[in-house]
Image: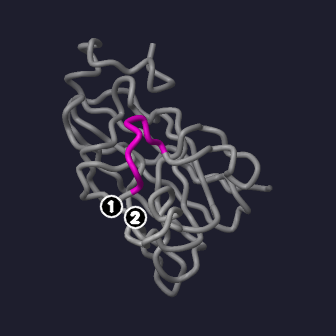
Amino acid sequence: MYPKSNTEVTTETPFWASLYFAIQVRFTGGSGDVTGSIYLSQVGPDGEVEVRGALEGLSRGQHGFHVHMDGKLGNGCKDAGGHYNPLAYTHSSPSSPKRHVGDLGNVEAGADGRAEVELSDGHVSLFGGHGIVGRAFVVHAGEDDLGEGGDEGSKKTGNAGGRVTCGVVELVSEAVEDGRAPQEKSQPLTSGA
């Protein structure tokens, strides 16, 4: 009854169009050294997506943070494919009106390896044909230059380097009418690979 992929969540479904629902990403792909969970929520198909959570085990500094094409976590997160880019724009910053849908910039880890994730985005959606349910979030080894690096790689990936962890965007709660994020129902998983 509840959607399991972005193609099952549509604006024609009145139940979903008027209610809040939440999505979780558990970072389980990659080496297993970086773990964490983030929660995504959106009120209606035109609302911004709120992204909240934390990652642990990162090196200190900025790390590219993107939605990738596929919800596949194998091969060191490479099976997730490239940045989610259904509109065929070049890579850019989250504030750019023309960018990959998956371009969410960077998360910053402190000396303790922890990155608190808290952002809102109007390009990403949990609804419809360009929705991200069933796709993968990927955290990169290096900083995303936001398309300003002056080379071809910058306009494609932001030169953010290798992939250190990834997780699939999955439904974790049925719709709720009060707009509150769900409580985490289980501990984040870690990768054994």
Tell me the magenta residue range. 84-91
Q: Residue visible at 27% across and 50% down?
A: 121
Which residue is drawn at the image coordinates 55% and 70% (left, top)?
56
Residue 18 falls in which quadrant of the image?
top left
Measure how far apart labels 1 and 2 are at the Cα level.
Answer: 7 Å
Q: Which is closer to the viewer, label 1 or label 2?
A: 2
Q: How many marks?
A: 2
Image coordinates of residue 41 in percent, x first then y, are: 32, 41
Query: Magenta stretch mostly in which secondary structure?
Result: loop
Is residue 12 found inside the magenta-colored segment of the image? no
Residue at 44% x, 19% y is 2
Query: Quick check: marks 1 and 2 in contact, CB under 8 Å?
Result: yes
Q: Find numbered disc 2 in the image and state the secondary structure of the residue it sits on.
A: loop
Q: Horizontally, is 179 left or right of 154 in the view?
A: left
Residue nearer the viewer, 174 or 116: 116
Instruction: From the image, tell me which residue sits under label 1.
Output: 93
**Residue drawn where x is 59% and y is 38% of the image:** 71
* Apparent side of residue 107 relative to residue 16 in the rendered image (left or right): right
Locate the N terminus by quadrant: top left
Establish if 51 lies above or below 170. Answer: below
Q: Amino acid at mark 1?
A: Ser
Q: Which residue is mark 2?
A: 147
Q: Say which label, 1 or 2, has the lower sequence index.
A: 1
Q: Residue type at mark 2?
A: Gly
